[in-house]
Amino acid sequence: MQTLPRRFGLLFAVAVSLLAFIALPAPSAQAAEVLLSQGKPATASSTEGVFSARSAVDGDLGTRWSSAFADPQWIQVDLGARAEISRVALTWEAAYATSFRIEVSNDAQTWTVLHQTATGAGGAQSLSVSGAGRYVRMYGTQRATAYGYSLWEFQVYGTGGSGADTSRLLSYGRTGAASSSQSDQNCWECTPARAFDRDPASRWATSSTTGWTDPGWISVDLGTTAQIDKVVLQWDPAYAKSFQIQVSPNGADWAPIFSTTSGTGFKQTLNVSGTGRYVRMYGTERATPYGYSLWEFQVYGTGGDPVPAPPLPSDPANPPRLVWSDEFGGAAGGKPDATKWRADPGTGPNNELEYYTDHRNAALDGSGHLVMEARKEVTAGSSCPRDPLSGSTTCQYTSARMNTGATFQFTYGRVEARIKVPKGNGLWPAFWMMGADFLTGRPWPYNGEVDIMEVLGKDVKTSYSTVHAPAYNGGGGIGAPYTLPGNADFSDDFHTWAADWNSGGITYSLDGRTVFSLDKDQVEQTRGPWIFDHPHYMILNLAVGGDWPGPTDAGTPFPSKMLVDYVRVFQ
């Protein structure tokens, strides 16, 4: 959603709060206490855009958590182990709480109040408290403004807790077993190993011929005995309404460490405590007529015989630096830089009507622009869906499509292009990214697709930004339409589309204005697995016809031109 600007008064309050924080720092921590919360897992009742819970425990006063505009709301941090809590420091954004509680819990279910106030003043607060537990939360019951709750930092001090490296992923690459496995056209080789590969686009599922029954289970062998403290389940829509998490010393004798009859599906993070070599999800009641299916089954704790997982990609620098660009300089008639772009000739997907040529429809204009041109011309020997105007199934149009798949692939960054789109029924200009594993055989949408700009020629007052993944794609992709100020036409001038992409999600902007944000945690908890944390490549194309834009008509202008001023990537 679009992040609304704060009122001037609130901005002034932010400045006052931060000045107070700088001028009057919180009392120094006692000698025995240490900061327990920084970098630990954090969750919240809700998130506004990209302002996720993790941003309040990252030690960075330039990032924050923000909630929905409603009461009550909360943010909590998992310290990893039971700790003695001596102080909680809150650094509020202008959207602060007048009434809130600081609470502690051993299981994130039953809470004890350590501090309570109905006269919160915002700013920087250092609260001396006394209590013990693994989880600490700020529970807000009354907002001071019409906005939500927002914290630059939520810091918990005390003694005990767990070190940053005590609890780790134990299940990656370990041997799995299951009651059954599916392997057909709907889920090919959906074996137990797929749930333990830390690949959110592959999954395990019970057999469609023998396994859509109760009970159904999947287990993992951790190699040796381990102390289990967390299990993360990323469910396919075929999830368990009733299930247990069980542990075993030998893979035969099982003891439950978690049980529910009200499973919610999607992503479930279960804080548990148990000891065993084997861990199992044992489903006793399916939520759908189908079986049980998990994209990911992750077990965390200490001990075991963990296989080191590949390192996760690094976020872009702050501020990011330019790492790749094409400004499209050069003489008129010159072709796109072959060290940066390769033509992608052939017919298009989605029942499109064009034939993409080998750069014959792409050229520089001598004024710093790339021109991608759609023409009404027949490609002999080609095959396209029937053209409504001519009735022919030979492709009646040509156009341009090119990508950086062979020259430049990257993970995370700010991806930006300045483009002028054409107008006319059936035209479909786009700037987008595909997961690079598409080039090595992984089919769409399992590779992931990130659409930065799509405009339909029949409605050049609206642009779209969308992501596609196995659990949400096509018409079910996660995205949003947006317009220009004054409802102007996109085809009248150049506009700059950008996607800021990192480990926490994607923020889309138009001409510097945020138009849509995707928070990774929120997507995983409400729509399905987030599959975009791996290399992608960029694509520019101008399609003609197709399922979404519809066909051309007698009034569609040909040739039609999509002009690209530049494409840049910052990391």
Image (cartoon, rainbow, N blue to C red):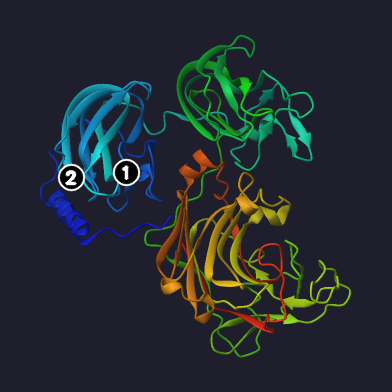
On the rendered structure, is 558 left or right of 229? right
Figure quadrant of the N terminus? bottom left
Residue 50 place in picture, x, y as percent:
41, 51
Local crowd size for mark 2, using a 10 Å CA cut-off: few (<14), some (14–19), many (≥20): many
Residue 515 place in picture, x, y as percent:
44, 61
Residue 414 place in picture, x, y as percent:
47, 63
On the rendered structure, is 498 left or right of 86? right
* Residue receiving disc 2: 122
Residue 431 visible:
yes
| Secondary structure under the numbered disc 2 in the rendered image | loop
Residue 56's disc is 1
Q: Quadrant of residue 176?
A: top right
Q: Nearer the viewer, residue 150 or 463?
A: 463
Query: At 53% from the left edge and 67% from the top edge, which residue is drawn?
Result: 463
Q: Relative to 415, is 305 above or below? A: above
Residue 550's disc is none
| Residue depth check, mark 1 versus mark 2: number of the one nearer the observer | 2
- Which residue appears farthest toward the left when viewing the image? 24
Q: Nearer the viewer, residue 433 or 558?
A: 558
- Per the model, the C-alpha gap separating discs 1 and 2 is 15 Å
Residue 32 visible:
no
Question: Mark 2: which amino acid?
Answer: Gly
